[in-house]
Amino acid sequence: MPIKIVRNDITKIKCDAIVNAAKPSLLGGGGVDGAIHKASGKRLLLECMQLGGCKVGQAKITKAYKLPARFVIHTVGPKWEGGQKGERELLESCYREALRLAADNNCESIAFPLISSGTYGYPKDQALEIAVDTIISFLVDHEMLVYIVVFDKSAFQISEKLFTDITAYIDDKYVDTHFMFRRSYPDAMEESTVLAETQLLSDDLDAFESQVPCQSSMPMAPTASLADMVNQVDESFSQMLLRKIEEKGMTDSECYKKANIDRKLFSKIRGNVHYRPSKTTAIAFAIALELSLEDTKDMLMKAGFALSHSNKFDIIIEYFITNQNYNIFEINEALFAFDQNLLGI
Ligand code: AR6
């Protein structure tokens, strides 16, 4: 199941367990700890008092009381002391232990704040990377929906270089588009027109094929490739997805996990040849399959979408595909930084 990055107050998230970045006494404090205790009420503190504290890198579970979750999992992150004091291992252990407790308590969903990245001073980009890496490892053999809850945008930083590169790419493409339209498209062609034309082409080919009698004197190869073409044009999104999974030698679960899509949604798509995914779902699969830009556009077209140069989201996707960077979590981090919708679920 996938990772979902959301910007919110963790006390508002409805899921089975929320994680608290606590202190060793477990008796409340500032930051996310203070917010959780305040929203949950005094009974949370009373239960915490029975737990006898918690070591750094470990986790303990309580009920969630007034919160819209079933459990609060309290974990104590390491204080940042320059990075040479085992901070990384301890922070990884916080995520692992919290996830293990959630699994032991049959949780299907869990929400994490960026542990240690506030009062404890862990550099935010590293804290985020550790969170994502550790959660991905856990999800390889567990089914759970995992939220990473980012409170304020400054807590969520992609590298300066990536940000600058993407900004430059966006600027370039915007200029390109405006220039191209002035030069070659006096009447801007709408996406729907393009789709309608494709449909026409497919209908025409159907009609053409049914009218041409099969003659033995006709060369076979062109007919076969025409049939292939027709089949490809008529192929639905779901059929293309399954074909590509096979061609790439992937298993279904490798594909939907890499796409950050949950198993139930994948089963729906697999079971319904005419399934119409959202644009973000369609792109997530194109990324998981590491499709070229052309194939991505083709796959999107089958779902009724296109990539255009008139919005940032599309240009950012194009940036990653042309740079052959198919890491969906990095793409989502960039989309998040540019205030765009995220891929996958
Ligand atoms: N929802 C989601 N994230 C939040 C919220 C919220 N309501 N409030 C803060 N954050 P911190 P730490 C983010 O300081 O660094 C406490 O006093 C915040 O922006 O809460 O692990 C404890 O008692 C930051 O990115 O936890 C400990 O003594 C992240 O949560 C100590 O602080 C973690 O910030 C723990 O420090």
Image (cartoon, grey):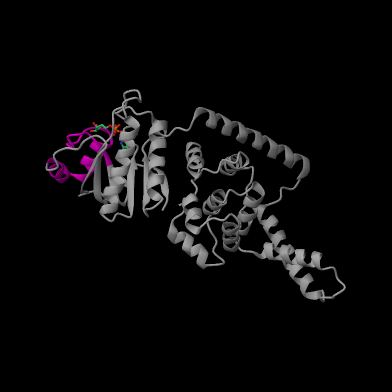
Does residue 6 sit above or below 191 in this rendering?
above
- Nearest to the observer: residue 138 or residue 204: 138
Which image quarter: residue 38? top left
**Residue at 59% over, 54% down:** 248
Tell me, yes or no, if residue 115 can be seen here.
Answer: no
- Residue 222 seen from this side: yes
174 sits left or right of 337 in the view: right
**Above or below 113: residue 280:** below
* Residue that extends furthest to the right in the rendered view of this protein: 217
Nearer to me, 38 or 273: 273
Tell me where residue 113 appears, x and y as whole percent.
Answer: 33, 39
Q: Residue 333 location in percent, x, y? A: 47, 39
Describe residue 101's horizontal placement relative to residue 190 as left or right: left
Magenta-tinted stretch: 20-49
Indicate the quadrant of ligand 1 in the picture: top left
Q: Residue 315's image quarter?
A: top right
Residue 65 % position (x, y): 20, 49
| Position of residue 198 in the picture relative to residue 82 (left or right) | right
Give me the residue at 61% from left, 54% from top.
Answer: 300
Asked if residue 39 is among those painted magenta in the image, a careful observer would answer: yes
